[in-house]
Image (spheres, grey):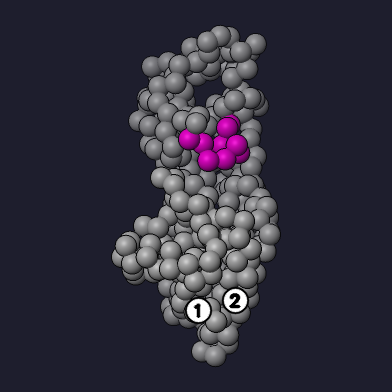
Amino acid sequence: MLDWQDIQIFLEVARSQRLADAARRLGLDHSTLSRRTRRFEQQLNTQLFERSTHGYHLTEAGHRLQAHAEEMARHAFEAGEGLTDQNHRISGQIRLGVTEGFGTWVIAPLLTAFCERHPGVTLDLLALPRVVNLSRHEADLAITIERPSSPGLVISRLCDYRLRLYGSQDYLTRHDSPRRLADLRRHRLIGYVDDLIFSEQLSYLDPLLDPTVVGHPGPHFAMRGTSVTTQHSACLRGAGLAVLPCFMASTTQALSSLLTDDVDIVRQFWITSRQEQRRLARVRLLWDFLRDALEINRDFLMGEGHELTIPPAFS
């Protein structure tokens, strides 16, 4: 008979792929977790993990066990939720993962109304310059810039948003405004570090910097970063021109949009959750709240308004 605690330990290591991360989440020390994992493999007389300096990766047998373990965990979770009646009470914790810029500039302000409406709910907002992994149970809900493809997820298109090319008044006074794409060869740009971009949806500048248009070697990048907030700050201080979401740049008169006919980029945000989490009343409420709040801010997200509208504290 398999021990349920051993199954939980195996599942956390499989999700985390790093012993230190799994130990922290389980509240165990590293050596204890390593010992228990090896003991579980010995009990099954089966190697479940390939161990390397890059972490713990499942063997074929490990993948087969994970499928059963995930199902067991799902049933245990639903049983616990049903017994404690938390499925119907608007209280508890919700962890929402979202990209850094959108989370900081839009989602966090909007959530003030949700917190007022549901004081019994605790919100953990993970605003990160990467994709939150729902399969590893990093969050209950995620807002992403790409449509997730993992099975077992509930996925919905959340909203569109627009990006434009911006420059500060200080920079434009010193360097003049570009009048066509070819003029970018004479300007300093701010963008992402190419090999650290976590989504192809962020490669905004590539189609704008066609060598046949802007020449070779092309514009000089004054600064690159992994954070859109960093790029916004550098652009605001006059370091160069940057492609930024309108929901960040249009809130201040210090930044001007440039080449609006040539640089008009529209992207989407997607909202997603695991099926078992989506059934919880508090998660459904947050899902619906975000959809409604972003719908009333459609013009703002598309660069046609300059101020975020916060929903009323009581619906």
Name the one closer to the observer, 111 or 48: 48
Of the image marks 1 and 2, the number of the one nearer the N terminus: 1
How far across and down, in percent of the image, does residue 22 sit?
41, 62
How far across and down, in percent of the image, does residue 202 sit?
56, 37
- Residue 4 is labelled as 1
* CA distance separating discs 1 and 2: 9 Å
- Residue 72 is labelled as 2
Q: Residue at x 65, y 52 (%)?
A: 148
> Is residue 314 left or right of 276 when viewed as pictured?
left
How far across and down, in percent of the image, does residue 151 sit?
68, 59
Depicted 162 relative to depicted 185: above or below: below
Depicted 23 relative to depicted 216: above or below: below
Q: Residue at x 52, y 81 (%)?
A: 90
Depicted 227 relative to depicted 69: above or below: above
Q: Is-magenta flag for residue 202?
A: yes
Depicted 28 relative to depicted 207: above or below: below
Task: Confirm or deny contact between disc 1 and disc 2 (CB under 8 A).
Answer: yes
1 or 2: mark nearer the eye: 1
